[in-house]
Image (cartoon, rainbow, N blue to C red):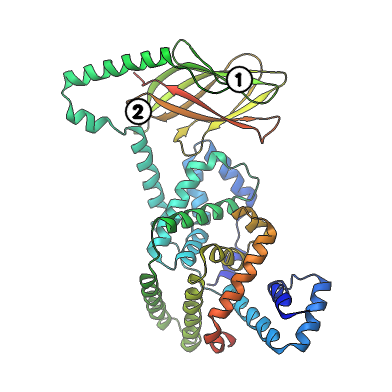
Amino acid sequence: MRCDTAREHFSDYASGTAHEALRAALDLHLADCPSCRREVEDLKVLWRALDHLEVVEAPPGLRAEVWRRIDHDLQTHAMPTRRPLAALLSARWRRITVWAAAACFVVVLAGVTVPGHYQRALLGDLGLRRFLPISSLGSMQAQVSSVRPVVVGDRLFDEVHIAVQVEGPGHRVRILPEEGQVVTGEEVLIGSGAPSEVVVRVGHTFRPHTLSLRVQDQADLRHETVLRLTIPASP
Amino acid sequence: MTYEGARKRSSDPAEDMQLVERCKRGDRDAFDELMRRHERKVYNFAFRLTGNYDEANDIAAEAFVRVYTRIQSFRGDSAFLTWLFRIVTNVFLDARKRRRPRPSESLEQLVEADDRALARLAEDASVSPQAELERRERDTILQRAIAGLPEYQRAMILLYHVEGMSYEEIAAAMDLPIGTVKSRLNRARLALRHALEGSAELFAR
């Protein structure tokens, strides 16, 4: 065995995880090679030194700092623009702005079409109805049925009720919030058949926004789709 | 206390999963308990990656926030701790992309830590001051050598040797094939050995 080949296996040899044949070959090489022998000894010493590094205690305020950041993110997500806007506009202009924004939103809703070969949008009672394939055999429809503000503890949320219907023989989907979104609400498992309701709470916002939910096909967990719903501003 | 001792107190993966399930239902106490169980490991790992107390605090806190916001996506395909270390590594790599390292500050902090440790040592009659001094010197030199490794190699060395993770667990945590993990770890160890050649006598004791 050459030195450069032997060197590739020194770590396994020094840790005792090299298999028997490799160990025997390395033993033979090391018996005749003082420089490789020294290298292996050094690695064993390094191994011990790494094992004995001292533990550094976590600072006592670490968990409090994490909660501070989480709560700050929740607050920021809840009311991103209200205060600066309110500070700029008088009460009369605020009312006009709100009504104008609501009117624009209705116009946008009425005219929107969703690009893509499988998604299309229809105007429902309140929000868009989305059609989403969940596999080659099944699909689902989802529609926002209501949005209302709720106060939990000292926080303001928008509670969004979504009607979901799964179609296709024997299909079940799991719905859960997409990563990074501040959403409370349990994962919901829905089988095909009658419509079900999914309720999630998102940070309250002054404007219409998009809610993303992950839809997992329970027949094939690798198949996951993102359902995006436009949520109108809560009253 | 050494890492060797800390590794033996590894948490129960089944209990971690129970807490994760409660977190998914919005239970803040469960998340606090998860943090309490793992904050020392996370902070230690972050400190050994950065060599800097403030940066370690920032990375550990940011990693836990990321865990909180992504807990719904954790399906238990790997142990929670493996997933957690993956997130800490990613937060560290992201932070390094955003800003340059601060080596001078790191070295100052290591010396400061040594001073604090020596003050404690003066009150502890059970430890030989000479032996403790040598051990601290070894730690400092080793930490500097680790800090000199490329970031991925640094993370791998710490996950394997300090956190006691297997090749398979590191492969899962870093999303790499096992063969790549083995070859990179081997290169990292040889680079560390090379960096420590001038201090061979201290480490041989």
- Pointer 1 local density, CA inside 10 Å: few below 14, some 14–19, many at least 20: many
Q: Give the quadrant of residue A149.
A: top left
Would you say residue A161 is visible in this rendering?
A: yes
Residue A66 position in % (x across, y down): 41, 50
The amino acid beneath tag 1 is: Met
Mark 2 Cα within 10 Å, few/some/many (few <14, many 20+)? many
The one of A24 and B133 positioned closer to us in this rendering: A24
- Labels 1 and 2 share a subunit: yes
Q: What residue is shown at x 49% (from left), y 85% (from top)?
A: B134
Q: Residue at x 69, y 23 (%)?
A: A171
Nearer the camera: disc 1 or disc 2: 1
Residue A161 is left or right of residue A21, and the answer is left
Residue A140: which disc?
Answer: 1
Query: Disc 1 to disc 2, how far (Cα)?
Result: 27 Å
Q: Is residue A164 above or below residue B109?
A: above
Name above or below for residue A74 compared with residue A200: below
Q: Residue B164 appears at what percent x and percent y?
A: 62, 64
Q: Label 2 lies in what chain?
A: A
